[in-house]
Image (spheres, rainbow, N blue to C red):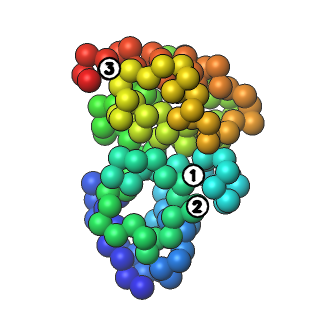
């Protein structure tokens, strides 16, 4: 089936089965490999993208369910003020170790700070609980989110 998807502000056309996960469409059809395949079962968060600003697991999102929602991926998140601030904070605290989980972490963190610009530690922990990191970079991720929140607090 033919779909026109809005991805990072651009219209992208694909012709795929409606039940194909969005993650497959991004990586295999559009060669957008920044979004990672981890578990394929909604358990790790490596595949997190935004649909209309909300963090979703693209491995669990059939392309047929996307409709007209705006898709944002790690390739485009830096175009948003919050996303750029999160990425800058990530670099400042040197958050990644192997890096595999980090695209998903950044997408979840940006969605959190967009909906809740000044989260408490508990709220950060809750919001990020679906994003696993085998390298256990959780402490630096917390630090990066708090830094990004501080630096964007004036922007609301
Ligand atoms: S790959 Fe989607 S949640 Fe793990
Ligand atoms: S940095 Fe290696 S899995 Fe998170």
Tell me if mark 1 has few (under 14), some (14-19) or many (20+) residues whose alpha carbon lies within 10 angstroms of its own. many
**Residue beneath disc 1:** 47
Which quarter of the rendering shows the C terminus?
top left
Q: Quadrant of residue 51?
A: bottom left
Callout 1–callout 2 Cβ contact below 8 Å: yes
Q: Residue at x 32, y 61 (%)?
A: 69
Q: Residue at x 57, y 52 (%)?
A: 47
Horizontal side of residue 60 vs 44, given as left or right: left
**N-terminal-most mark, 1 or 3:** 1
Element under disc 3:
helix
**N-terminal-most mark, 2 or 3:** 2
Cβ of mark 1 under 8 Å from ligand 1: the answer is yes
Q: Point out residue 86 in the picture as x, y percentages from the top left corner.
A: 43, 28
Q: CA distance from mark 2 to mark 3?
A: 30 Å
Identify which residue, 72 or 52, lies in the foreground: 52
Q: Point out residue 44 in the picture as x, y percentages from the top left corner.
A: 66, 47
Q: Residue at x 47, y 41 (%)?
A: 107
Q: Quadrant of residue 139?
A: top right
Say above or below: 91 vs 63. above
**Residue beneath disc 2:** 59
Q: Residue at x 52, y 49 (%)?
A: 48
**Residue beneath disc 3:** 152
Element under disc 1:
loop
Identify which residue, 44 or 90, lies in the foreground: 44
Q: Point out residue 104 in the picture as x, y percentages from the top left corner.
A: 55, 43
């Amino acid at each position: 089936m033919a779909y026109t998807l809005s991805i990072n502000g651009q219209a992208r056309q694909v012709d795929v089965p409606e039940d194909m996960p969005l993650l497959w469409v991004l990586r295999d059809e559009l060669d957008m490999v920044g979004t990672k395949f981890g578990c394929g079962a909604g358990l790790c968060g490596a595949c997190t993208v935004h649909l209309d600003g909300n963090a979703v697991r693209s491995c669990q999102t059939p392309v047929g369910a996307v409709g007209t929602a705006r898709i944002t991926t790690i390739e485009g998140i830096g175009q948003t003020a919050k996303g750029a601030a999160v990425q800058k904070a990530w670099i400042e605290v040197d958050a990644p170790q192997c890096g595999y989980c980090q695209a998903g972490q950044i997408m979840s963190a940006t969605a959190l700070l967009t909906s809740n610009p000044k989260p408490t530690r508990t709220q950060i922990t809750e919001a990020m609980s679906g994003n696993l990191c085998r390298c256990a970079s959780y402490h630096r991720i917390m630090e990066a989110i708090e830094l990004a929140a501080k630096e964007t607090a004036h922007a609301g």
